Image (tube, rainbow, N blue to C red):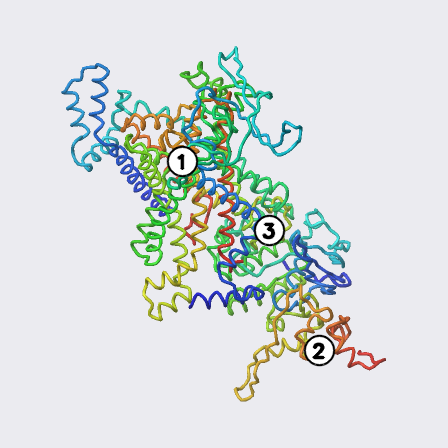
């Protein structure tokens, strides 16, 4: 294979010690040297695991509410305690609440009551649910034993719903919308960018102008306009996919640009010309010779595109034109934090924002690391 | 130079035309026609609707006719009479509603651009000249944070802190007593005392990006031989750096305005909603939720046009400061 | 402006035991130049010859103290003795000090290899030359511009008044290099350092630039340090020559001596790798030097050329040879010389 000989030649030239390593091994080796990117990789994997096992990890269903505990403050979890015999050990618990009336604001506030302790149990049995929508299960990772006891590790919202549970479920929606959006963008980006880069000519110039045009538009007004056109009576699934399509309207341009650039760079490379002279079909030249050599670049570019998608969804939902109420995403959660007076009494409503920042940072570092590693022969 | 300007102007006109198509398509997207909605809301509130008025409106906007016809009526109205259509929610022509709002938008965004440049330039130069120093690392961290924190979240946090620590409710651009007043020194002061927060929020992400671009550009330029030449002349080091590599690195930085502006306009929409600013943003959001489509379409069109004009200005500045473009070299 | 030949005694510039070290946080220090002695005579031309990466450019930049921050001069002196001032040791000056800046560009100036990228792309030629004059002399911008135009005329740029307002990208490579030369000469330097000034130019332009430099040297009476890898150019322009290999000056002396009787195996190898004009029958095969130049990190412990030397013998890889006199003002660093000299024998 032409690619194999090229890799071999390059490998020998650049790094004799490595010998015959596969391209992916070299990428991985370079990537591992990037500490921050490696840590970020684990963070991102962790969040996606949370997204997959959301129902099991969250103590409650996202819609579970208890109107007795509106805006209850975060309890936190205490991990160690003494048992009846006075032995100190790993015995997680949370404190209960007492209510006080704030005379000035004329409303109830919740204060942690150190006299009431609720045990936290692992693999607790709850009402049956389906993990990821199809695996029937009856246990959750943790929860409080007494069914009526309050359990708000990260606090409650205005309906007394558990913020932690909603955050975990929101992770699924927000992360997957980024992923689906990028897959969609990738499909169009690779298709259009590939054509445009491989064949050039008038098609290329039309595509280039289109990309320039879309990128010169302010995205939020455009997205808002498109999102506003969604019929209000659409169900959750329809809205979800409509949003991913709306985000991809802008998203494909960046990926198409990357793909086109790689195609243009590779089209004149010796191994591609050699394959063409050998009589290989366009399809074979592209799939066997060109795509493998820039796959890593595409993966890096796609990774870097995900955080933008997540931010966009968060912004749209925050403005109320993205995902709508029964769907839980980081954006819809943050919508609850819009009122500054609410926020002042329940600042924990901003926690979804902290999660957004962590995930966006991790994905940016991961993408940067991948991009640097994607070119194992460069530099 | 002249050829460059003409080609830019032509491409600007084409872009604006394309934006108008997109904006009008957005007007048309919601199902049903808005006149029907308008009549329905009027009847619901008990107003009597004169069928002749309705018919006149229907004729004026070409409702019920093909897309092209309606588009033509809309665009020709804008070009010939400056008539952007009717806001059904406000019951007034769109032109009467938007200009003050757009003016505020331009003011805020302009201030943000100025702040970005004034902050990002020295930091970027410092970070590049003192590569891998403590200051460089701090600038890099700031850059990553600035890019990762969504601006509406930053605005929320700022407002929360202002309220929790100082009991101040941030928001708006003017105190009530200056709301409708004419511009005076006191009003400017009042404006600044309100506007610093949104400008700060708007400028942060752009500043972070500009620092990154400036640092990378300058690092490239510092390696170039003409810097050595300048040093070999016997110039003091700071003059070498400021007069030569920084000057050259400014050129690509000016062209970054082209892609900074769309983001800036985007963020100003969302930040204005959060901070309740009297700019085009909240008006756009409201018009979209109430399906007041001529108003929405006009705002989308004008925000787009604003961006394109900003980009044109940055192109012209680039041509002005870069002789290679001015004389058509390269 | 022709000058009266100077009366001052002794060499203009002496490098004595000069070493230059590059340090980086991740890797071991790299000794780019080690214990180099060079002498530049007033009004004469010293050619510094060697392959790329041998340290010749680094040496030249050290004289102007325009090396990177990562470079240091751990040992040695650079004594500069202009006619009308006290000698100074440039190696001890702070690179950004006033003392150094009044020498740089004013007393010692430099022209570079890449006329394309060595001029600022966004300033006019005239601006860049004016700046140098105004910086070092008390003149008005107008006077400076008049002098710039005279200089441009002198270096053979046609239409100097218009060309002063031109940007570098509007000129050809040859004209740009002429402009560089005009800039370097603008303050009547005592020493002109030319770092491969003709390498990037085509052959006819090369010859013109060399002629120009020679003629200007006659007019101005300045000394010249000419850096090149082209032995043909050396023969044409130099009075003295020093051959560098991997940070060492392996052989130096009068250009006729060195060319007629090259002593160091590296110099000999360089000489025999130049094609000569001969009849086809008499032509010999060119003899390239075996192997490639190692990086300064992998420099042999002894003589730096020992890893490629065809006649290396027992001490070469271990012991670094000292410079040995092999003729009048002709010195060579090679064990071979020491061995061939019988004890007590002296070369005159």
For mark 3, name the chain. Answer: B
Are the numbered discs 3 and 2 placed on the same chain, yes or no?
Answer: no
Is residue A373 in sight in this rendering? Answer: yes
Q: Residue at x 37, y 24 (%)?
A: B100
* Left or right position of B60 against A376: left
Residue C232 lies, in percent from the top left, at: 59, 73
Picture quadrant of residue C182 = bottom right
Between circles 3 and 2, the one closer to the viewer is 2
Quadrant that contains the C terminus of chain C: bottom right
For mark 1, name the chain. Answer: A
Tell me the tag on residue A129.
1
The reply to whether callout 1 and callout 2 are in contact (CB within 8 Å) is no
Secondary structure of the residue carrying numbered label 1: strand
Q: In this view, does C186 lie above or below C274?
A: above
Which residue bears the numbered disc 3?
A: B230
Mark 2 crowd level (few <14, some 14–19, many ≥20, 10 Å Cα) = some
Q: Is residue A326 above or below residue A67?
A: below
Mark 1 crowd level (few <14, some 14–19, many ≥20, 10 Å Cα) = some
Which residue bears the numbered disc 2?
A: C312
* Left or right position of A114 against A291: right
Between circles 3 and 1, the one closer to the viewer is 1
Tell me the tag on residue C52.
none
Q: Residue at x 56, y 57 (%)?
A: C180
Residue B68 lies, in percent from the top left, at: 19, 38
Is residue C327 in sight in this rendering? Answer: no
Quadrant that contains the N terminus of chain C: bottom right
Secondary structure of the residue carrying numbered label 2: loop
Are the numbered discs 1 and 2 placed on the same chain, yes or no?
Answer: no
| Residue furthest right in the image | C344
């Amino acid at each position: 294979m032409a690619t194999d000989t090229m890799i071999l030649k390059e490998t020998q030239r650049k790094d004799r010690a490595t010998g015959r390593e596969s391209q992916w091994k070299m990428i991985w080796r370079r990537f591992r040297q990037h500490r921050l990117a490696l840590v970020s990789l684990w963070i991102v994997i962790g969040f996606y695991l949370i997204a997959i096992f959301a129902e099991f990890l969250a103590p409650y269903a996202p819609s579970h509410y208890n109107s007795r505990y509106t805006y209850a403050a975060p309890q936190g979890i205490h991990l160690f305690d003494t048992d009846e015999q006075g032995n100190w050990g790993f015995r997680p618990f949370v404190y209960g609440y007492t209510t006080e009336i704030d005379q000035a604001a004329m409303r109830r506030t919740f204060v942690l009551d150190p006299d009431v302790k609720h045990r936290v149990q692992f693999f607790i049995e709850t009402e049956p649910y389906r993990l990821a929508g199809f695996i029937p299960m009856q246990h959750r990772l943790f929860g409080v034993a007494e069914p009526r006891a309050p359990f708000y590790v990260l606090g409650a919202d205005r309906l007394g719903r558990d913020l932690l549970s909603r955050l975990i479920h929101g992770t699924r929606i927000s992360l997957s919308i980024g992923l689906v959006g990028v897959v969609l963008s990738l499909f169009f980006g690779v298709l259009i960018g590939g054509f445009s880069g491989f064949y050039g000519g008038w098609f290329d110039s039309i595509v280039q102008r289109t990309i320039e045009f879309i990128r010169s538009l302010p995205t939020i007004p455009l997205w808002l306009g498109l999102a506003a056109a969604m019929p209000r009576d659409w169900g959750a699934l329809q809205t979800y996919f409509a949003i991913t399509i709306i985000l991809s309207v802008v998203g494909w341009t960046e990926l198409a640009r990357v793909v086109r650039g790689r195609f243009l760079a590779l089209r004149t490379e010796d191994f591609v010309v050699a394959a063409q002279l050998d009589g290989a079909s366009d399809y074979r030249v592209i799939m066997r010779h060109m795509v493998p050599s820039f796959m890593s670049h595409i993966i890096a570019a796609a990774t870097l595109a995900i955080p933008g998608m997540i931010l966009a969804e968060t912004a749209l939902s925050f403005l109320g034109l993205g995902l709508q109420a029964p769907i839980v995403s980081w954006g819809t959660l943050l919508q609850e934090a819009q009122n500054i007076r609410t926020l002042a009494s329940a600042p924990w409503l901003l926690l979804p924002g902290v999660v957004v920042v962590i995930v966006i940072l991790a994905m940016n570092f991961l993408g940067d690391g991948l991009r640097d590693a994607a070119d194992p022969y460069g530099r | 130079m002249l050829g460059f300007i003409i080609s830019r102007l032509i491409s600007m006109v084409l872009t604006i035309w394309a934006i108008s198509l997109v904006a009008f398509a957005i007007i048309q997207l919601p199902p049903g026609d808005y006149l029907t909605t308008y009549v329905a809301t009027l009847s619901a509130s008990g107003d009597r609707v004169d069928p002749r008025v309705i018919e006149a409106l229907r004729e004026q906007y070409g409702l019920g006719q093909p897309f092209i016809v309606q588009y033509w009526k809309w665009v020709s109205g804008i070009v010939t009479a400056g008539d952007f259509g009717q806001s059904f929610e406000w019951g007034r022509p769109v032109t009467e509603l938007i200009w003050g709002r757009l003016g505020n938008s331009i003011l805020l965004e302009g201030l943000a651009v100025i702040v970005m440049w004034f902050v990002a330039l020295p930091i970027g130069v410092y970070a590049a000249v003192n590569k891998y120093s403590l200051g460089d690392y701090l600038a890099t961290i700031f850059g990553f944070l600035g890019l990762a924190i969504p601006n509406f979240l930053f605005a929320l946090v700022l407002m929360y802190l202002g309220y929790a620590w100082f009991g101040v409710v941030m928001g708006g651009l003017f105190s009530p007593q200056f709301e409708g007043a004419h511009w005076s020194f006191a009003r400017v002061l009042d404006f600044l005392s309100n506007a610093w927060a949104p400008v700060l929020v708007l400028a942060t992400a752009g500043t972070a990006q500009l620092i990154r671009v400036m640092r990378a550009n300058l690092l490239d330029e510092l390696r170039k031989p003409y810097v050595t030449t300048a040093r070999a002349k016997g110039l003091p080091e700071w003059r070498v750096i400021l007069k030569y590599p920084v000057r050259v690195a400014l050129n690509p930085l000016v062209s970054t305005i082209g892609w900074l502006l769309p983001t800036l306009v985007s963020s100003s929409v969302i930040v204005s909603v959060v901070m309740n600013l009297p700019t085009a943003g909240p008006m756009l959001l409201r018009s979209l939720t109430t399906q007041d489509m001529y108003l929405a379409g006009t705002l989308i069109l004008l925000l787009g046009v604003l961006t394109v004009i900003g980009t044109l200005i940055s192109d012209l500045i680039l041509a002005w400061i870069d002789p290679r473009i001015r004389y058509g070299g390269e | 402006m022709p000058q009266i030949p100077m009366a001052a005694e002794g060499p203009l510039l002496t490098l004595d035991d000069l070493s230059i070290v590059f340090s980086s946080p991740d890797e071991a220090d790299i000794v780019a130049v080690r214990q180099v002695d060079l002498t530049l005579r007033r009004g004469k031309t010293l050619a510094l010859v060697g392959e790329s990466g041998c340290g010749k450019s680094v040496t030249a930049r050290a004289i102007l103290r325009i090396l990177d921050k990562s470079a240091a001069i751990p040992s040695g002196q650079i004594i500069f003795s202009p006619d009308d001032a006290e000698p100074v040791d440039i190696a001890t000056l702070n690179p950004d000090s006033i003392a150094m800046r009044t020498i740089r560009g004013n007393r010692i100036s430099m022209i570079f290899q890449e006329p394309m990228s060595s001029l600022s792309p966004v300033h006019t030629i005239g601006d860049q030359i004016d700046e140098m004059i105004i910086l070092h002399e008390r003149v008005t911008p107008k006077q400076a511009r008049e002098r710039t135009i005279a200089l441009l005329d002198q270096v053979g740029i046609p239409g100097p008044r218009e060309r002063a307002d031109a940007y570098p990208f509007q000129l050809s490579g040859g004209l740009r290099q002429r402009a560089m030369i005009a800039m370097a000469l603008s303050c009547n330097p005592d020493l002109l350092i030319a770092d491969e000034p003709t390498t990037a130019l085509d052959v006819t332009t090369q010859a013109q630039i060399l002629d120009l430099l020679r003629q200007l040297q006659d007019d101005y009476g300045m000394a010249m340090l000419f850096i090149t890898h082209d032995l043909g150019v050396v023969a044409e322009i130099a009075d003295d020559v020093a051959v560098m290999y991997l940070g060492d000056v392996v052989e130096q002396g009068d250009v006729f001596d060195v060319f007629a009787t090259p002593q160091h195996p590296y110099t000999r190898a360089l000489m025999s790798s130049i094609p000569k004009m001969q009849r086809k029958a008499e032509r010999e095969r060119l003899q390239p030097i075996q192997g490639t130049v190692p990086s300064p990190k992998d420099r042999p412990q002894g003589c730096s050329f020992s890893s490629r030397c065809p006649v290396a013998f027992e001490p070469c890889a271990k012991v670094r040879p000292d410079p040995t006199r092999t003729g009048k003002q002709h010195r060579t660093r090679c064990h071979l010389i020491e061995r061939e000299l019988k004890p007590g024998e002296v070369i005159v």
